[in-house]
Image: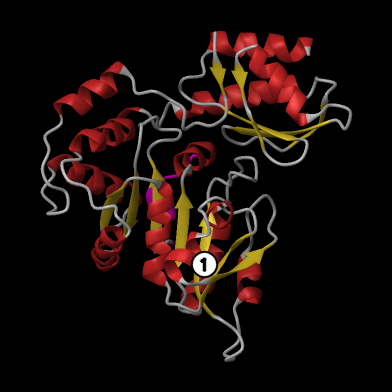
Amino acid sequence: MKIDLRSDTVTKPSKEMLDAMYLAPVGDDVFEEDPTVIELENTSANIFGKEAGIFCPSGTMSNQIAIRLHTQPGSEVVCDKLSHIYNYEGGGIAVNSLSSVKLLAGAGGRFTADDVLKSIQPDDIHAPITSLVSIENTSNKGGGCCYDLKEIEKIAAVCKDKNLPLHLDGARIFNALIAKNESGTEHGKHLDTISICLSKGLGAPIGSVLLGSKEHIHKARRIRKVLGGGMRQVGGIAAAGLYALKNNVDRIVEDHNRAKELANVLKTCSFVKGLLPVETNILVFDLNDDVKQVDFLQKLKEKEILAVGFGPQRVRFVTHLDFEDSQMDKLTRVLKEY
């Protein structure tokens, strides 16, 4: 029995999702004529109370489009030092937008409104121009922790006062909404653009949607084209995301529950030095100094259990819809016997 906890991106489409993909009506999306894509974009926008959306191949692309539409060459993007847009998008802020970054040292990837206020550059020709604030919810490198909505409101207030757009990298925003029992519209009203991922906790094989005003999304279509993201008869893929939004959001709580059960197991394991608080579906833990990370991961692999290193002596597990109770039982047994 193989267990893959490297990421929630490893899930396979269910039969029902595949059926939806096979039966989806299609058209040319570059001409904005694919009915399934249009439905996906409108459905996504409605969830967060935004005017429009644009379907993209990946979350990296949707984030990079947002950054480019909010900035100019020589701009500076304010984000946390643990943020995905800085650590895992290939230097895209510099390559695509010719902008630099102002890295904040938040708590678990989450910073405060006061941090934002202090980060804004003065009107000085020696400094880049602060042009965008970007938050990530949930925080991947922060162990899947969530922003407090009140803090997002405060950050948004600072941004509004300073005439700065606020972008959300919401790769796992549905995990945050489920964990906090909040709605997309509660978040959306404070954010200028939102990137949501369909291929993580929701279980679609590919795709993200960038949400914003009609003006933002009109500009985003040109940027997507330049980046090579213009797609044609892509309704078959969009149908997977549409199915996921309609069927796989509420069940995310199961992933959270299994992650918390697994956290309780890890707390009893002698090889675990420490464990980040578990709020959603990501578990990040540190190994004792006498247990080499490479050896630990290899021994798990020999038991057909896959995980990833997440820094020196640090390991990440991510629960998802393809991680079931029988697999949980096997993993628990292996960890206790390690």
Which quadrant of the rendered structure holds the C terminus? Answer: top right
Q: Position of residue 22 (x, y in %)?
A: 18, 25
Colour mapping: secondary structure
Count of marks placed on residues: 1
Q: Position of residue 121 (x, y in %)?
A: 60, 81
Task: Give SS at disc 1.
Answer: strand
In this rendering, is residue 46 above or below 116?
above
Residue 188 shows in this picture: no
In this rendering, is residue 286 above or below 59?
above
Q: In the displayed structure, does residue 34 sit left or right of residue 207?
A: left
Q: Position of residue 133 (x, y in %)?
A: 52, 67
Front residue of 294 and 238: 294
The magenta stretch spans residue 220 = no
> Residue, x 20% and y 43% (percent of image)?
37
Front residue of 253 and 3: 3
Q: In the displayed structure, does residue 88 sit left or right of residue 233?
A: right
The span shown in magenta is 181-190
In this rendering, is residue 156 above or below 17?
below
> Residue, x 16% and y 49% (percent of image)?
29
In this rendering, is residue 120 above or below 254?
below
Please tell me in which quadrant of the rendered image residue 295 appears.
Answer: top right
Front residue of 235 and 226: 226
Say which residue label 1 marks: 133
Give neighbour class at mark 1: few <14, some 14-19, many 20+ (Cα, 10 Å).
many
> Residue, x 33% and y 55% (percent of image)?
211
Q: Position of residue 66 (x, y in %)?
A: 39, 62
Which quadrant of the rendered structure holds the N terminus? Answer: top right
Q: In the displayed structure, does residue 285 sit left or right of residue 126?
A: right
Q: In the displayed structure, does residue 92 sit left or right of residue 61?
A: right
